[in-house]
Structure formats: structure tokens, C-alpha cells
Image (cartoon, rainbow, N blue to C red):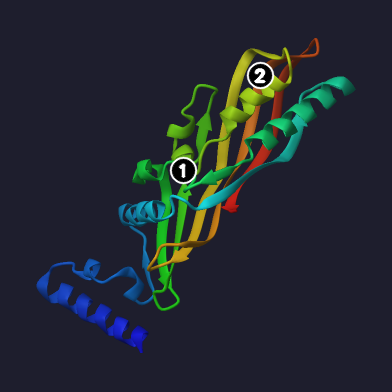
């Protein structure tokens, strides 16, 4: 019965908007709306900020895992063992719990996103928000947390590389510097439309890392590359 009433309230408001020329649909609480999709980035981000405020104490778990083994152009077993262990240790060290939405939800802008969508379903009782951030590239000096992926999900690459270099004990980037690429980023959150309590969450991206001209155990390598996957879910 409540869903029927909500539906007619929504239709009445739409008709009122049509005849008066004023958009009054915002007067209806979201959880009383029938199934509807919002795709205007600014509107979706406003909902996302409300979601962030409502979930400041929600705990998530971030996990970084190796998706592409280190490649370094050397047949040395010692170098291979050193690099593989150092990469895996750095990824494990960056895997941590997060309180509140990952990234910087208050600072995300429409320009950070390829697309954004908010969907009310289950008779308006459930809200699903999907954000597709623009891909981001980094160096050791940034933009890091201030890039499109950094603001939306959190840029983990620079801490990983810094930890990796420290873990190698005397290794140093000689010529090629460092580069990071955050690819295929996506955020999908399902929440109660009335309370905004999150019931499902998936944040993630693929990360490609390159260190150029690195010296390890007395062996100079033209580069070191590896791939990783970053995923964040409810703890």
C-alpha cells in the first residue's frame, strides 16, 4: 500500500512540475520515490556526499594483490627473489582497514568522473550508486590523493613504491623515475535509501607500476614493472 501511495505522490509531483514549470521532485524523500535513475553527475555526487556523512564510522577493508608478476630484465635468482618478496611485502603493508568512505568523498568533482549513476529500486527502498572515475597517472610526487582516482577511491601506488624501495635495502631509482597508472576504476555502493546505511560496497582499480633504472643487490636493471589489483569491500 505504501509503495502505491509513494508512486501516486511521485506522479502528482511530476505533473505539478510540468504545469508550474518548477521542479518540485526534490520535495519527496528518496525512499518514497518509485524506481528511478539519476545520471546527472552533480546530483549523484550530492547523494554520495550524504552517503559519506551517514557512514563516517563504517569500516571497510582494502586489499592490494599482485596481478602481474614483477618483470625486471634479469635472470639473477637473487634479484628475482628480492624483488618478488619486496613487491608482495609492500602490497601487503598497504592492505589495511579504512573507516569511512575511501578517498575524499567531499572533494570529488564532476570533472573527476567519466560517469555517475544513482538508482532507486525495490520500490524506492534501496539506493545503488555507481561512479566511474577517470583513469589517473602518477609519479612519486603526485597527484596521488588529489587526482581523480585518489579522490574517489584512494591512490595506493606511491606508498607502495616508497615501501618497496625501502624494503629493497639500498636499491635506488637511477634514471627512469617512477610511474603509476590507475586503470578501470569503479565504485558501486548499495545502501538503504532512507537511512543511507551501506549494505554492499565495491571499490577498485588495476594498478600498473614502473620503476626505471633501479639498482638491486649490485645489479642495475633498466626497469622494474608489476601489476596489482586494489579492492575495497565492507569489513
Q: Quadrant of residue 1?
A: bottom left
Circle 2: is it few (<14), some (14-19), or many (20+) Cα within 10 Å? some
- Residue 24 seen in render: yes
- Residue drawn at x 63%, y 35% is 94
Residue highlighted by disc 2: 212
Identity of the residue drawn at 30% across and 86% down: 5
Residue underneath mark 1 = 134
Mark 2 or mark 1: name the one nearer the start of the chain.
1
Mark 2–mark 1 distance (CA, rounded to whole Å):
25 Å
- Please name whichever residue, 129 or 178, is drawn nearer the observer in this view of the structure: 129
Up/down of 162 relative to 14, above or below: above
Residue 76 picture location, percent across and down: 87, 20
User: Residue 172: x, y in percent?
Assistant: 68, 13
Q: Quadrant of residue 165?
A: top right
Mark 2 residue element: strand
Question: Can residue 76 be seen in this snapshot?
Answer: no
| Residue 86 drawn above or below residue 91 | above
10 Å crowding of disc 1: few (<14), some (14-19), many (20+): some
Residue name at image x 47 percent, y 48 percent: 100
Where is residue 55? Give x, y as percent. 44, 54
Q: Determine the residue located farthest toward the left in the rendered image.
A: 20
Farthest-out residue, front: 57
Amino acid at each position: 500500500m505504501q509503495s502505491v501511495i509513494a508512486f501516486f505522490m511521485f506522479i502528482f509531483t511530476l505533473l505539478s512540475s510540468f504545469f508550474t514549470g518548477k521542479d518540485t521532485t526534490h520535495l519527496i524523500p528518496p525512499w518514497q520515490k518509485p524506481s528511478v535513475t539519476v545520471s546527472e553527475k552533480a546530483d549523484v555526487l550530492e547523494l554520495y556526499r550524504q552517503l559519506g556523512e551517514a557512514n563516517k564510522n563504517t569500516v571497510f577493508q582494502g586489499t592490494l594483490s599482485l596481478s602481474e608478476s614483477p618483470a625486471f630484465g634479469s635472470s639473477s635468482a637473487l634479484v628475482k627473489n628480492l624483488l618478488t618478496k619486496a613487491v608482495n611485502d609492500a602490497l601487503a603493508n598497504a592492505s589495511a582497514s579504512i573507516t569511512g568512505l575511501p578517498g575524499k568523498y567531499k572533494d570529488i568533482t564532476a570533472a573527476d568522473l567519466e560517469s555517475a549513476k544513482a538508482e532507486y529500486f525495490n520500490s524506492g527502498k534501496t539506493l545503488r550508486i555507481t561512479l566511474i572515475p577517470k583513469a589517473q597517472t602518477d609519479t612519486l610526487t603526485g597527484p596521488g590523493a588529489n587526482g581523480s582516482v585518489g579522490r574517489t577511491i584512494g591512490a595506493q601506488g606511491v606508498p607502495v613504491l616508497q615501501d618497496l624501495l625501502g624494503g629493497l635495502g639500498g636499491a635506488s631509482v637511477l634514471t627512469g623515475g617512477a610511474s603509476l597508472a590507475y586503470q578501470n576504476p569503479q565504485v558501486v555502493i548499495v545502501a538503504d535509501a532512507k537511512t543511507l546505511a551501506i549494505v554492499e560496497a565495491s571499490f577498485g582499480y588495476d594498478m600498473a607500476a614502473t620503476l626505471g633504472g633501479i639498482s638491486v643487490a649490485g645489479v642495475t636493471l633498466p626497469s622494474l614493472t608489476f601489476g596489482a589489483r586494489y579492492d575495497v569491500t565492507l569489513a
